[in-house]
Amino acid sequence: MSDIKINMSIFKEDAVAWLSKLESGSVDLVITDPPYESLEKYRKIGTTTRLKNSKSSSNAWFPIFSNDRFEELLTEIYRVLKTNSHFYLFCDQETMFIVKPIAEKVGFKFWKPIVWDKVNIGMGYHYRSRYEFILFFEKGKRKLNDLSIPDVLECKRIFRGYPTEKPVSLIEVLVNQSSEEGELVIDPFFGSGSTLLAATGNNRVTYGCDISESAHKYLMDRVS
């Protein structure tokens, strides 16, 4: 563990192993973007250039988290969350259909997929994508802080950043909707560190874990 700024602590190990060490019912909010298995498909065919294996990019940024591990991951997330709390998971349309039934099986209530409108069109072949899903789950019952926020969040994608990097301003919407100042927000796959920065910048306590050395280096560069 290392403290890189007030109220932010980061860890480097497998996400499920790390979660298993946290106390049950100790976390107020989870926001995460796991490197889901369908990313491997995009990486192989080169539709996501920063993920493919080439001279200009590397597929060694992060290891893929396989679909068959989602049940153990979601079980641990449910355990560490307090009753009456929220959980957000970024994913594509393929992974959504895998995650939703598993999350419901372990105890979560699924509210809806929030749509992140990236404004700019992405690469691809069939109706090129400009959106991503944020699955919105609940443990117990917790009211959102602002009921006027729509289920489509428009925010420009990040170019030339960490692969799959999310805008801090986008994550801030989720942080401010589902937590209060001083509460604990965690991200078991922190990647570029956007969740940690969004939470810390809004006076939350944050823990983050990522097994990738690239993620740790990228976050350290951002905060320094």
Image: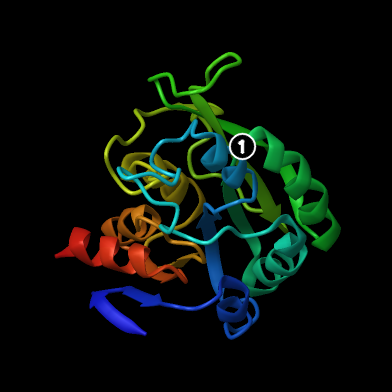
Tell me the quadrant of the picture where the N terminus can be found.
bottom left
Q: Tell me, what colour scheme is on the image?
A: rainbow
Which residue: 48% across, 66% down? 186
Which residue: 63% across, 53% down? 142
In-image side of 104 versus 40 (left or right)? right
Residue found at the very far left of the displayed protein = 224
Residue 178, percent from left and from top: 51, 51
Residue 172, percent from left and from top: 37, 46
In-image side of 155 versus 115 (left or right)? left
Indicate whether 69 appears above or below 195: below
How dense is the environment of label 1, judged by Cα within 10 Å: few (below 14), some, or many (20 and up)? Answer: some
Q: What residue is disc 1 on?
A: 92
Residue 45, percent from left and from top: 55, 34
In-image side of 134 versus 149 (left or right)? right
Report the number of numbered marks: 1
| Residue 9, quarter of picture | bottom left
Residue found at the very far top of the displayed protein = 127
Residue 69, percent from left and from top: 72, 64
Indicate whether 180 appears above or below 15: above
Which residue: 34% across, 41% down? 167
Tell me the quadrant of the picture where the C terminus can be found.
bottom left
Q: Nearer the viewer, residue 91 or 214?
A: 214
Q: Nearer the viewer, residue 97 or 136?
A: 97
Q: Nearer the viewer, residue 26 or 51?
A: 51
* Residue type at the position of mark 1: Asp
In-image side of 84 versus 144 (left or right)? right
Q: Nearer the viewer, residue 167 or 107?
A: 167
| Helix, strand or loop status at disc 1 | loop
Which residue: 56% across, 41% down? 44
Residue found at the very far front of the displayed protein = 55
